[in-house]
Image: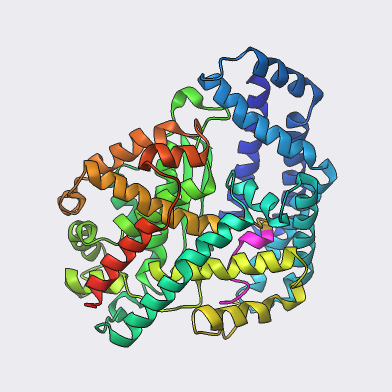
């Protein structure tokens, strides 16, 4: 654990440099930053793959009570060591270098619709993903190795089955809303919003909910994300937009990630058990706080007057109008601004493209056309530019291929956890309308956050909800909520 602490320290330094790169760093620092990140990543890789750590790990595994916290630490560490050992140091360094370069190009290429500037970097990063899959190994599909990096135990087949289960019900409900639903207008939520004022509102709201700003901060950046250096330093960013959801919903989304990290036990800090167990479970918390809680009637019954006070009386609408507007269902080009229903279709597009690229059916040159064709097929819209099309996300610039399905998994797990919460807290809307968020937060802290990475994700989900991940709770939630909003 002492040696692992050195690895954690290097990771924290790397995360801080990455946070700075996205929030504060001047463009001129790009080349040096790529080199610095490469050195830190290589040093961390060397620790996890060292003969000394491997010998100590093998010895500890023989001597540790299999039911203890220490055994759980060794289980998580073993997984990390096995992954890192299979990846050549040269590949790890190359990915960091190309990814850092790609991110800097993306920041300037996206606003001016210049996909060509990134095409070669995308191809290199997808080629790296194929190499990574080959080194990690897989039994049935190369995507298995990639998705498992982000969600332990997930496979191409399980992701495909998940999307097959939810795709048609989503498309059919969206079509019914379009053809038969009452009209909903969100025009009053669009306009020239003061991003700083919205940031201040969400910071105040997050404080009331239970986010500890003595151990965190909220900044505005081109893309929203949450970085954890340790449980005492959890930093969120939010993104500006012409829609009130841009800052508000993004902030509550990242707050969900941050609450999870702040709730990690102090006793496990700098050990493999610190922090959230997986991306899908993490995403279940961010999507729950953003959507199930943060777009609920009870939530805005309490916070809408505070928002209007902060914004000088805007938006000029009552609770019912605001509630319908912030939950409007309308296919849009940009994933991060999507409604709850169509969001999973955005993820489906990315999942299928990643699979097609990894299996050689699509190349980086083909991506813009392939992207647009899938948007036309699944959402009935065609992006007019690559800025709101294939360039919109930051993930591929970092080589994070296999990541996207965890967003959809998080939606499903979040609804599943919410159903479990309702058995113990049957009237959360009334609590939220009175500004009483502590019972909800404490329930989540006790059952999820305080367990950190103690259990594998599938086991944690079953412990909390009584069954493995399933789409049924989310489908029930979505149908009940949106049929009521649209009077179907």
Could you tell me residue 323's position as x and y percent?
Answer: 24, 69
Colour scheme shown: rainbow
| Residue situated in front as seen by the camera: 445 or 393 | 445
| Residue situated in front as seen by the camera: 217 or 60 | 60
Could you tell me residue 410's position as x and y percent?
Answer: 46, 53
Vertical relation: 210 (above or below) 69: below
Residue drawn at point x = 72 percent, y = 39 percent: 83
Give the quarter of the figure containing the N terminus.
Answer: top right
Image quadrant assignment for residue 240: bottom left
Numbered-mark total: 0
Q: Main secondary structure of the magenta part?
A: loop
* Residue 336 seen in this snapshot: no
Image quadrant assignment for residue 450: top left
Give the quarter of the figure containing the C terminus.
Answer: bottom left
Residue drawn at point x = 66 percent, y = 78 percent: 370
| Residue 59 lies in the magenta-colored region | no
| Residue situated in front as seen by the camera: 379 or 251 | 379
Image quadrant assignment for residue 202: bottom left
Residue drawn at point x = 51 percent, y = 20 percent: 67
| Residue 389 lies in the magenta-colored region | yes
Residue drawn at point x = 76 percent, y = 46 percent: 137
Specify whether 236 is left or right of 37.
left
Specify whether 319 is left or right of 183.
left
* Residue 60 seen in this snapshot: yes
Could you tell me residue 252's position as x and y percent?
Answer: 37, 55
Name the outermost residue toward the top.
63
Residues shaded magenta: 388-397
């Amino acid at each position: 654990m002492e040696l692992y602490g050195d690895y954690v320290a290097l990771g924290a330094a790397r995360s801080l440099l990455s946070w700075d790169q996205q929030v504060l760093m001047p463009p001129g620092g790009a080349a040096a930053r790529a080199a610095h990140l490469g050195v830190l990543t290589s040093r961390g890789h060397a620790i996890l793959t060292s003969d000394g750590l491997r010998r100590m790990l093998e010895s500890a595994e023989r001597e540790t009570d299999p039911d203890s916290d220490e055994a759980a630490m060794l289980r998580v560490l073993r997984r990390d060591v096995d992954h890192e050992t299979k990846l050549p140091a040269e590949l790890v360094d190359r990915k960091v270098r190309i990814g850092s370069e790609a991110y800097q190009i993306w920041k300037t290429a996206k606003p001016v619709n210049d996909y060509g500037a990134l095409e070669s970097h995308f191809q290199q990063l997808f080629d790296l993903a194929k190499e990574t899959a080959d080194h990690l190994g897989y039994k049935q599909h190369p995507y298995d190795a990639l998705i498992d990096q982000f969600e332990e135990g997930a496979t191409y087949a399980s992701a495909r089955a998940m999307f097959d289960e939810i795709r048609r019900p989503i498309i059919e409900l969206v079509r019914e809303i379009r053809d038969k639903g009452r009209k909903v207008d969100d025009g009053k939520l669009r306009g020239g919003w003061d991003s700083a004022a919205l940031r201040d509102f969400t910071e105040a709201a997050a404080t009331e909910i239970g986010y500890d700003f003595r151990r965190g901060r909220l900044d505005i950046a081109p893309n929203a994300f949450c970085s954890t250096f340790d449980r005492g330093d959890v930093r969120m960013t939010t993104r500006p937009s012409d829609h009130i959801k841009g800052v508000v919903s993004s902030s509550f989304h990242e707050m969900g990630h941050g609450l999870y990290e702040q709730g990690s036990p102090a006793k496990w800090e700098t050990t493999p058990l610190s922090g959230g167990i997986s991306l899908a479970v993490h995403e279940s918390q961010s999507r729950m706080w953003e959507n199930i809680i943060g777009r609920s009637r009870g939530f805005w019954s309490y916070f809408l007057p505070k928002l209007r006070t902060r914004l000088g009386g805007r938006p000029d609408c009552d609770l019912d109008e605001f509630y319908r507007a912030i939950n409007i269902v309308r296919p849009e080009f940009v994933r991060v601004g999507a409604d709850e229903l169509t969001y999973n279709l955005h993820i489906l597009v990315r999942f299928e493209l990643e699979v097609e690229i990894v299996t050689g059916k699509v190349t980086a040159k083909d991506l813009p056309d392939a992207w647009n064709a899938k948007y036309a097929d699944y959402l009935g819209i065609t992006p007019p530019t690559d800025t709101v099309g294939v360039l919109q996300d930051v993930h591929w610039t970092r080589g994070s291929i296999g990541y996207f399905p965890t967003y959809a998994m998080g939606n499903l797990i979040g609804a599943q956890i919410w159903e479990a919460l309702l058995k113990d807290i049957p009237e959360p809307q009334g609590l939220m309308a009175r500004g009483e968020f502590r019972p909800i937060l404490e329930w989540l802290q006790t059952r999820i956050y305080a367990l950190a990475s103690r259990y594998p994700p599938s086991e944690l989900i079953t412990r909390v909800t009584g069954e493995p991940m399933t789409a049924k709770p989310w489908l029930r939630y979505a149908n009940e909520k949106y049929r009521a909003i649209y009077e179907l």
